[in-house]
Amino acid sequence: MKYDYLIVGAGLYGAVFAHQATKRGKKCLVIDKRNHIAGNIYTYECEGINVHQYGAHIFHTNNKQVWEYVNQFAQFNRYTNSPVANYKGEIYNMPFNMNTFNKMWGVITPQEAKAKIEQQRAEAGITEPKNLEEQAISLVGTDIYEKLVKGYTGKQWGRPCTELPAFIIKRLPVRFTYDNNYFNALYQGIPNGGYTQMVANMLGDVEVKLGVDYLKNKAELDKLAKKVIYTGPVDAYFDYKLGALQYRSVRFETEILDTDNYQGNAVVNYTDSETPYTRIIEHKHFEFGTQEKTVISREYSAEWKPGDEPYYPVNDDKNSALYTQYKALADKEENVIFGGRLGEYKYYDMDKVIEVALAVAEKELNF
């Protein structure tokens, strides 16, 4: 066998593992069926702007170890995620905070905002939220739910909020301060030069082969290494024999515009149900760009089907139960480690992918 590890997927998880293994003197081969490294955090240059091909990726973490780790491979700017919501031409700050409440209701103090939310929750008669709609009204009241949550979330998940589990909305920050910092993380920013360069620095001199489909060439590829690190879809690995796991996918329409500033913010969410896209990203604002032109991407949420890129696992009871069965099969694969968002069927932020990959590498390589 020519390699210690065959790493399937040149995204963040695979790159971190490859870096750690190489540091321990292991020989790795990284393969990816795409024609580029960096997975979904891939960026490319257009008009001097680093474009996030697969949607906005904003690095944020409270984990100092993870922050110090990524700073070996890139210098990060001070970008702070502060999206705005556009509801039929009305602009509101995100996350939901005192600026949002003031614009919506004219309230000035946190006490007034809390009283308004409590009044609307009581009028809706919600005691124990049973779905996303009831959970959202409990958190932010009926007005904000109707204007800023209902349409956006319905587009994002392709089903009404009354059919979505309450836990989805629990990730949504609500603050009674005049603070538009969405993540509120201790460390956040965008790597200068884009994510692709950061991942290239992680991979260093590791051998990488692109345009290689592991599952189509599994038998011969498995012969090359003692162990496989697999970051592709877990159900695809087992040829969907228990059925396909569900995902949400995203489609992008990207265009170059002959203006230096299209929307004044990196991320604008369109929260009404009539606008077909969920948001517009203006890439230059991630790096405080002053280029003469700009590049924007409209995002359209879609139900995943084979051949599409899977983005968000649908973590409802049915899919969670199916994943549990696939995990039992995965655990029996002696020389394969399943990792990452697709390998573990879990919605991971970037810092969590790195944290988990470092932990797996430490256990595997006995750091």
Image (tube, grey):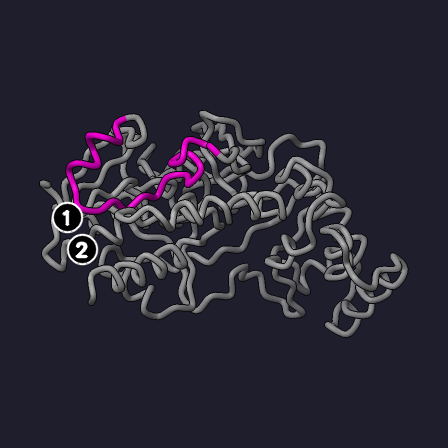
Nearer the observer, 202 or 185: 202
Looking at the rendered image, the disc whose residue lies closer to the viewer, 1 or 2, is: 1
Crowd class of label 1 (few under 14; some 14 to 19; many from 20; radius 10 Å): some
Which type of secondary structure does the marked residue at label 1 adopt?
strand
Marks 1 and 2 close (CB-CB < 8 Å): yes
- Left or right: 229 as drawn, with respect to 321: left
What residue range appears in magenta? 217-241
Quickly name the residue at label 2. 21
Decide: is 214 above or below 318: above
Please give the name of the residue rendered at 32% of the width and 49% of the height, measured from the top-left corner: 12
**Viewer can see residue 193:** no
Q: Position of residue 353 (x, y in %)?
A: 38, 55
Q: Position of residue 45 (x, y in %)?
A: 31, 36
Tell me the number on the disc at residue 4: 1
Amino acid type of disc 2?
A: Ala
Please give the name of the residue rendered at 49% of the width and 30% of the height, measured from the top-left corner: 252
- Left or right: 54 as drawn, with respect to 69: right
Please give the name of the residue rendered at 69% of the width and 37% of the height, measured from the top-left corner: 159
